[in-house]
Image (cartoon, helix red, strand yellow):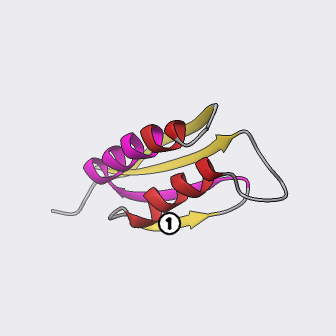
Amino acid sequence: MRLRVEFTTEPFDLDEAPAHAVVAREVIQAADLDAVDVGPFGNTAEGGADQVLTAVGSLLSKALASGATRVSLQVNVIGEDAP
């Protein structure tokens, strides 16, 4: 199964990316995921279910430990892995 995750962390700071946002992006960029897109108001990544779910767990724990007061995320099934 393939999944897409979309996420944001709060609180926002329009002048400089807060530590929790930087950490969350680093987790996603370092994970074994496809189609990673990071931006100032939202981030997305796609990959196999195990890889996405592992990255989401790490993202949540590290972002919250780095000062996030809210992490909004959505995970969607986008297809099946080819055999």
Left or right of 48 in this view: 74: right
Q: Quadrant of the C terminus?
A: bottom left
* Residue situated furthest left in the rendering: 83
Residue type, numbered disc 1: Val
Q: Does the magenta stretch mainly form a helix, a strand or a loop?
A: helix
Q: Residue 72 or 24: which is nearer the viewer?
A: 24
Where does residue 22 sit, x and y in percent of width and height? 59, 57
Q: Give the range drawn in magenta.
A: 41-60
| Residue carrying label 1 | 36
SS state under label 1:
strand
Q: Residue 27 or 34: which is nearer the viewer?
A: 27
- Local packing at callout 1 (Cα closer than 10 Å; few below 14, some 14-19, many 20+) is some
In the image, what residue occupies the spot 47% across and 68% down? 35
Residue 2 among magenta residues: no
Residue 56 among magenta residues: yes
In the image, what residue occupies the spot 54% across and 58% down? 25
